Each structure stands twice: as structure tokens, then as C-alpha cells.
Image (cartoon, rainbow, N blue to C red):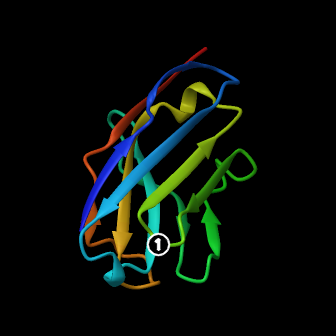
Amino acid sequence: VQLVESGGGLVQAGGSLRLSCAASGSLFSINAMGWYSQAPGKERELVATIISNGVTYYADSVEGRFTISRENDKSTLYLQMNSLKPEDTAMYYCAASRSDYFHPQYWGQGTQVTVSS
């Protein structure tokens, strides 16, 4: 499974971005997908996940501002990011797991999101 993110960029605080993750390969093996973020000097953090039945999870820091979704065939994962804050600045990584217990086996290369104040 290959994952390629896009959609990152520079945005002012309060703005929006939509990240996309194009998945290819053995998509039938994927159940859960999600997004992680990693800010400079910090550990990678889970942002949001979506499992095979469509149930979603969000970190407290993004609840109500971000929305995760994906195409039914799992070919594309999205992260709609609204009301962005400078603290959302990070590299965002797409990840996929063969299980609904989200322990990713597959990772994208990341896309940079920078939010200016």
C-alpha cells in the first residue's frame, strides 16, 4: 500500500485547508486510516482516525474543527481543517492499518501545514 499526501501549505490563523491522501496498492487489506501530526521538536501525535464502519475519532485539540473522511473504496482519505490555529503548524502524515485497532503499517511522506498568526 502506498500513501501520498497533498494539500498542505501556508494559511493565516482562522483559515482552512483540506488535506488529501491518495492510497494505492492492496486497498482491500486496509481497515482503519488516519492522520498524525508532528511539530518541530515534538513527538508524532494522532489527530484523527476513521475505521471500516465509518466511526471516527478526533484528538481533543482538533475536535469540532477538523473532519476526517474517505472515499468508499478507500482510495482517498481527507482531512478538512477549519479554524486553523498557529499551534496546528506541523507536518501531517497519512497512515493506514490492516486492523481497526489503529496500529499503522503504512505511512505517507507527509505534507507541511503552516499557520501564521
Quarter where residue 65 is shown: top right
Q: Nearer the viewer, residue 90 or 67?
A: 67
Q: Nearer the viewer, residue 91 or 4?
A: 4
Examine the rendered structure and indicate whether residue 31 appears above or below residue 78: below
Quarter where residue 7 is shown: top left
The residue shown at (41%, 64%) is 75
Relative to 91, 116 lies left or right = right
Three-letter code, disc 1: Asp
Examine the rendered structure and indicate whether residue 80 appears above or below residue 41: below
Quarter where residue 53 is shown: bottom right
Residue 115 spot, x, y in % from top left: 54, 23
Residue 97 spot, x, y in % from top left: 36, 75
Residue 17 spot, x, y in % from top left: 57, 33
The residue shown at (55%, 31%) is 87
Relative to 105, 50 lies left or right = right
Tell me the quarter of the image containing the N terminus.
Answer: bottom left
Residue 59 spot, x, y in % from top left: 60, 57
The residue shown at (62%, 76%) is 54
The residue shown at (46%, 56%) is 35
Question: Mark 1 sits on what residue?
Answer: 73
Relative to 109, 53 lies left or right = right
